[in-house]
Amino acid sequence: MRPPETRVEVYAIKVTLLGTSPPVWRRILVPREITLRNLHRTLQTVMGWTNSHLHQFVCQRPRLSDPGSRVGSKIADENRTKLGELIGTVGARLLYEYDFGDGWQHELLLEEVLLGDETFQQTCVAGKRCCPPEDCGGPQGFAELLQALQDANHPSHDEACEWLGDFVPESFSADEVNRRLCRRKH
């Protein structure tokens, strides 16, 4: 007789990079019990960031960030805090801030609570557009960069093309994101 399967609550989260137009977003499935530290690593991977800057999670409770960063006040330990302790009902939101200089804010919206089994692996199921490059000046800088990239007559066009190389703003591949998630050490 086989032992009963362990059921895992799975959160379907829509991650939207605020201030981008058209919006850059991802839809991910993560376990309810994921720590905020691991969620941060997942967000870095699915968005395409390089984990080069400080971050924090913001909700109606105290700010939650890397305990070593000393950013904000009343910091809770993200190594021990689980996502399900902060949001649990469909429609609940959490803010993830990355790179305080550029000011990237990601809205995490709990769209659905699903059930998985013990073999569940976090995954990216959908998304739109390529993540902005690191250190491009936040949403305003990114908009200016896109404008320069798309307009051959823009005074910064050549510089933008040289900096970004083969950057394609509309590109996104859930398969590629999931390959990166699988390669990442959990």
Image (cartoon, rainbow, N blue to C red):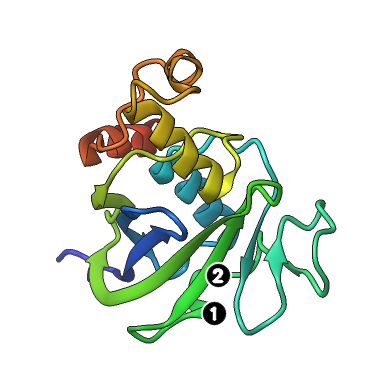
Residue drawn where x is 50% and y is 23% of the image: 156
Residue drawn where x is 39% and y is 60% of the image: 16
Q: Amino acid at mark 2?
A: Lys
Q: Which class describes the residues within 10 Å of circle 2: few (<14), some (14-19), or many (20+)? A: some
Residue 61 placement (x, y as % from top left): 66, 83
Q: Amino acid at mark 1?
A: Glu
Residue drawn where x is 34% and y is 21% of the image: 152
- Residue 186 in sight here: no
Residue drawn where x is 69% and y is 52% of the image: 100
Q: Is residue 56 above or below residue 179?
A: below
Q: Which of 134/139 is in front?
A: 139
The circle on residue 168 is: none
Relative to 176, is 57 on the left or the right?
A: right
- Residue 6 in sight here: yes
- The part of the image, by quadrant, that contains residue 105 is bottom right
Relative to 1, is 40 on the left or the right?
A: right
Residue 47 placement (x, y as % from top left): 42, 44
Q: Which residue is mark 2?
A: 82
Find numbered disc 1 in the image and state the secondary structure of the residue it sits on: helix
In the picture, the quarter occupied by the N terminus is bottom left
Relative to 97, is 94 on the left or the right?
A: left
- The part of the image, by quadrant, that contains residue 115 is bottom left
Q: Which class describes the residues within 10 Å of circle 1: few (<14), some (14-19), or many (20+)? A: few
Relative to 166, is 164 on the left or the right?
A: right
Q: Which of 27/137 is in front?
A: 137
Q: Which residue is mark 1?
A: 85
Residue 58 placement (x, y as % from top left): 62, 71
Find numbered disc 2 in the image and state the secondary structure of the residue it sits on: loop
Query: Label 2, label 1: how many angstroms apart (C-alpha)?
Result: 5 Å
Q: Is residue 9 above or below residue 126?
A: below
Q: Which of 39/97 is in front?
A: 97
Tag 2–tag 1 contact (CB < 8 Å)? yes
